[in-house]
């Protein structure tokens, strides 16, 4: 059943259209990801779908009786009501039923025989409805959702007026999940959630019977939850089968096809125009006129629907020594220990990621390394010729009151204006924007400006605290490619698991009271968690002071010899999806009447099916080995 139909929706603000004929539908229970660059109109589309804004033209139609829930990015909860009371308010109709059942039970105790039979029948009906709708499990449901989204038990009775902005956003999400509408519109639902709460949300949404459209910069969440992807760009949407990785692959395939078709037509048009130009007044005038008429009738192919990402580059500066950072006996505590007696060593060229729940000390660890915070015990030594460039997640390194062209100039270095313009352009900042003050930029623009400021320093050690905040999916992809190709050393904090998977080759897992080292990326961490869940409980309440050394990790991986060469899990998964998609295409072609009339093509197609099946079997084996041993 289709729960939502969107037909030709258009919306403009000023002269330029934001939405220019958006059309799609959503089926019951379908999980849809909505992606597009920053500023393309995703929130505008959500506001139109939710009835917050009216479209200038077109239609939004919901099936009869469909309940729609909208999670906005900005919270608006106030008052003396507690977190628990606000959550129970979602079940007002069930609570009224329970009160009614209690009243009927009271009346039954004093009713005469002639009335008691009718009251008993009504009481049974109320009981059955309450049981059917989970009316006797409300407290358990509320506790499960609040706990999953990171609320502590002592916060359940906290008044709304005392909540932080992040807590209010989490409570709005909790209320929406508890309500269980037929269609959920989720705008960045994992904002304000730590990694553990985000993983819980992924499982909850995947298991939910509700349909949903979700806007998110979290590609891991999109990959885990969505079954279809809508790309919003230049005012219209394109639909793709599958999750984010499937979309990313199909997008590139479509682009290649669109480029070939567009370029062939442009070449043909250029040849015809050249013939007309050369022969318009010559002996071949009639032929030129025929070709001019032909040219007018050609249906022009649109240029490729390409979303361009900035070509970010970090120069590595001078070569550092083999050891870049050596920490020994590192200890830091505030109200409770963040880390104790911690040792680690980072070598030149390595890419280290730091992950862990909010408030566990990740940023403090970075600031100890940069020298902004002194450890209580232990020491940190930087190697020879190490030069640090630090990205603060609050985006404070630049002079925010200066024009951007001046703000990216690093102290003590001479960089010409043209060099600074070129630098900003590599991070997607061009035109008059370079004359704006840094503090007037949007979050995404300011983030890219800070990255450009880091690039201008030509450091050989990048320390990055949540560098993907405010970046869209294409800018994140560009940053990942840039960091992977960076010749220096990287140490970064990120909640973006997809980002950690693509960039990191080592992890520091920060847990309450301890830090562990893992040689590998986020997939490696997940594989270790599957083998020993207690070992990877990054949100646990343990107060341990133990560290798993890299040598122990290596020994764990060597217990079983590899059958296949080393490959990242995410790369194997991408190839598996390509293989599965090709098999689906081959099966569809085998049902084609045109192919069935050609014996040679049938034979060749069946041979390729066998080849792809064999390849898929091998890829699955390779994936299993990589998950276990990487």
Image (tube, grey):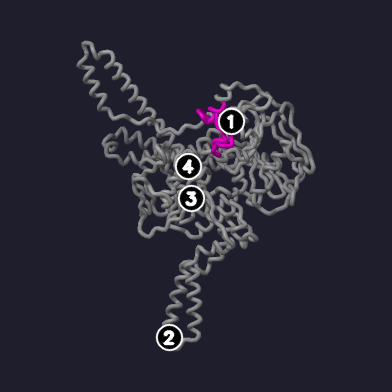
- Residue extending furthest toward the top: 283
Predominant secondary structure in magenta? helix
| Mark 1 or mark 3, earlier in chain | 3
Frontmost of labels 2 and 4 is 2
The label shown at residue 244 is: 4
The label shown at residue 186 is: 3
User: Percent position (x, y) of residue 359?
Assistant: 67, 48
| Mark 2 or mark 3, earlier in chain | 2
CB contact under 8 Å: marks 4 and 1: no
Residue at 59% across, 51% down: 166
CB contact under 8 Å: marks 2 and 3: no
Frontmost of labels 4 and 3 is 3
Gap in angstroms between the C-alphas marked 4 and 3: 16 Å
Q: Return the residue at label 1.
A: 403
| Residue 601 seen in render | yes
The quarter of the picture where residue 128 lies is bottom left
| Mark 4 or mark 3, earlier in chain | 3
| Mark 1 element type | loop
The label shown at residue 115 is: 2
Number of residues whose C-alpha sits closer than 10 Å to that of mark 4, classed few (under 14), some (14–19) or many (20 or more): many
| Mark 2 or mark 1, earlier in chain | 2
């Amino acid at each position: 059943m289709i729960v939502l139909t969107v037909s030709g929706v258009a919306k403009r603000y000023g002269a330029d259209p934001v939405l220019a004929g958006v059309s799609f539908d959503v089926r019951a229970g379908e999980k849809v990801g909505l992606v597009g660059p920053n500023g393309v109109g995703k929130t505008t589309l959500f506001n139109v779908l939710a009835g917050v804004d009216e479209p200038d033209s077109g239609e939004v139609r919901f099936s009869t009786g469909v309940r729609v829930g909208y999670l906005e990015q900005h919270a608006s909860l106030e008052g003396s009501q507690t977190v628990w009371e606000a959550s129970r308010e979602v079940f007002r109709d069930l609570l009224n039923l329970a009160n009614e059942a209690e009243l009927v039970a009271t009346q039954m105790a004093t009713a005469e025989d002639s009335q008691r039979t009718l009251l008993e029948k009504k009481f049974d009906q109320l009981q059955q409805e309450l049981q059917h709708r989970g009316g006797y499990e409300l407290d358990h449901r509320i506790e499960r959702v609040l706990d999953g989204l990171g609320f502590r038990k002592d916060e359940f009775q906290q008044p709304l007026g005392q909540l932080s902005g992040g807590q209010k956003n989490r409570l709005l999400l909790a209320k929406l999940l508890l309500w269980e509408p037929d269609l959920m519109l989720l705008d960045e639902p994992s904002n304000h959630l730590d990694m553990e709460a985000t993983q819980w949300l992924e499982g909850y949404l995947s298991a939910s019977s509700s349909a949903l459209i979700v806007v998110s910069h979290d590609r891991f969440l999109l990959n885990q939850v969505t079954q279809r992807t809508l790309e919003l760009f230049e005012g219209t949407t394109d639909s793709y089968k599958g999750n984010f990785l499937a979309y990313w692959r199909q997008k590139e395939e479509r682009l290649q096809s669109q480029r070939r078709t567009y370029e062939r037509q442009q070449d043909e048009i250029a040849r015809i125009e050249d013939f007309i130009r050369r022969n318009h007044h010559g002996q071949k005038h009639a032929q030129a006129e025929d070709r001019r008429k032909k040219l007018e009738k050609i249906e022009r192919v649109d240029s490729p629907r390409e979303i361009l990402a900035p070509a970010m580059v970090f120069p590595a500066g001078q070569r550092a020594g083999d050891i870049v950072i050596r920490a020994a006996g590192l200890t830091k505590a505030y109200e409770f220990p963040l880390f104790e007696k911690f040792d680690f060593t980072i070598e030149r060229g390595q890419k280290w990621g730091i992950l862990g729940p909010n408030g566990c000390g990740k940023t403090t660890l970075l600031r100890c390394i940069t020298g902004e915070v002194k450890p209580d015990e232990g020491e940190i030594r930087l190697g020879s010729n190490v030069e640090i460039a630090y990205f603060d997640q609050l985006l404070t390194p630049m002079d925010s009151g200066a024009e951007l062209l001046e703000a990216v100039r690093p102290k003590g270095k001479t960089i010409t204006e043209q060099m600074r313009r070129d630098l900003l352009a590599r991070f997607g900042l061009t035109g008059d924007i370079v004359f704006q003050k840094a503090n007037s930029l949007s979050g995404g623009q300011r983030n890219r400006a800070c990255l450009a400021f880091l690039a201008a320093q030509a450091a050989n050690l990048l320390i990055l605290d949540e560098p993907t905040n405010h970046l869209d999916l294409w800018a994140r992809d560009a940053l990942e490619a840039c960091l992977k190709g960076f010749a220096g050393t990287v140490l970064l904090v990120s909640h973006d698991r997809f980002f950690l998977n693509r960039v990191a080759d080592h992890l520091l897992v920060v847990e309450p009271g301890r830090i562990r080292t893992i040689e590998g990326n986020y997939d490696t961490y997940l594989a270790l968690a599957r083998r020993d869940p207690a070992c990877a409980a990054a949100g646990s309440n343990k107060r341990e002071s133990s560290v798993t050394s890299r040598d122990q990790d290596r020994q764990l991986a060597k217990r079983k010899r590899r059958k296949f060469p080393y490959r990242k899990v995410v790369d194997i998964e991408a190839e598996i999806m390509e293989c599965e998609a090709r098999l689906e295409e081959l099966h569809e072609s085998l049902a084609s009447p045109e192919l069935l009339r050609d014996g040679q093509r049938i034979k060749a197609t069946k041979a390729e099916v066998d080849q792809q099946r064999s390849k898929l079997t091998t890829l699955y084996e390779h994936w299993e080995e990589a998950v276990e041993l990487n």
